[in-house]
Image (cartoon, rainbow, N blue to C red):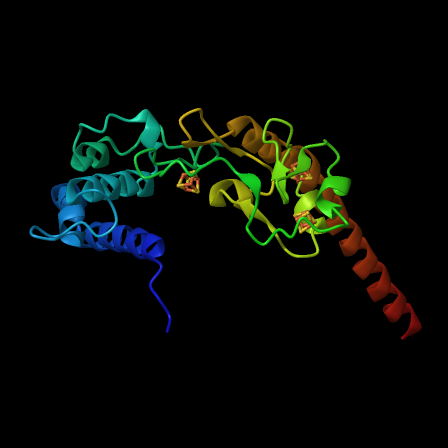
Amino acid sequence: MKTIDYSEYFKNKVLTEISRMFFDGTLEKDINRIPFNIIPKGSEAAFRCCVYKERAILKLRALAALGYSVNEIDEALPLSEYVSRNNPQFDYNSSKLLTVMESACSACVKSRYMVSEICQACLSRKCENNCPFGAVSIESHKARIDNNKCKNCGKCKEACPYGAILKISVPCEDSCPVNAVKKTGKGIAVFDHFVQSSLVFAVKIVLIPFASYIFILNIIYIFLIFFAIICFI
Ligand code: SF4
Ligand code: SF4
Ligand code: SF4
């Protein structure tokens, strides 16, 4: 049976409410009601400590949907205030369009590798032999990873024939292909906008001219083929 992805559910609910109000012409008047329309009075908290926090996070989702960086705004102001401002700072070309809702981030534990109970303390000791940093040792008939030496390379996990080594993942970090998501000392995720900006810069300076060059070459090539066909006819 398919279960609901509640993260997508709430995101879609907020966007649907904003769109509906926008097309009804009531966005500025009604936007403050969005958290209450989605989590009505009398509801019980299903995901967080209380409904007030759940509604506060929906408010942040609405602000993000309006294009605001939620960590740079005054949360005390009502949503309607932000609608009336018409977001003069909103910049479609900004590298800061992504934003982390700190109060929604549950500060996942740091990504690391750990040895599970499945470890046989096998004779081959592939985990120990394949660790480039000497972080694995065998103690009390079980492999042990020294987190001070471990560099999270994953070679021990790949090498263990019993699948005894597990990776504790941080979903936001794992899903970013350029390592632009990092966690602060408190465990809260933040974006490294320098990496984002560098990527945008690389796309603008290198890839776009390169793609244009290939496009022009293709046009010339097609023209030459067309010209050759005309000549043969
Ligand atoms: S995956 Fe990242 S953003 Fe999501 S709760 Fe964990 S640390 Fe926070
Ligand atoms: S973690 Fe795997 S490779 Fe290492 S000692 Fe245990 S069973 Fe052997
Ligand atoms: S993840 Fe890499 S550095 Fe850490 S214990 Fe395994 S092999 Fe060694």
Q: Residue 23 versus residue 18: which sits nearer the camera?
A: 18
The answer to which of 220 and 127 lies nearer the viewer is: 127
Q: Is residue 27 left or right of residue 112?
A: left
224 to 148, vertically: above or below = below
Question: Residue 177 location in percent, x, y?
Answer: 60, 43
221 relative to 152 in the view: left or right: right
Q: Position of residue 39 (x, y in %)?
A: 16, 51
98 with respect to 112 (left or right): left
Residue pictured at 62% horizontal, 51% vertical? 119
Going by the image, does 198 lie left or right of 52? right
Quarter residue 147 falls in:
top right
Residue for point 87% across, 70% down:
229
In this orientation, which residue lies closer to the viewer: 15 or 49? 49
Question: For the point 33% across and 25% down, which residue is it?
Answer: 72
Q: Quadrant of residue 232 in the image? A: bottom right
Split into 4 quadrants, where in the image is the C terminus? Answer: bottom right
Residue 198 lies, in percent from the top left, at: 61, 30
Of residues 83 and 76, the one nearer the viewer is 76
Seen from this angle, which residue lies furthest left?
Answer: 42
Q: Quadrant of the N terminus?
A: bottom left
Q: Residue at x 78, y 55 (%)?
A: 218
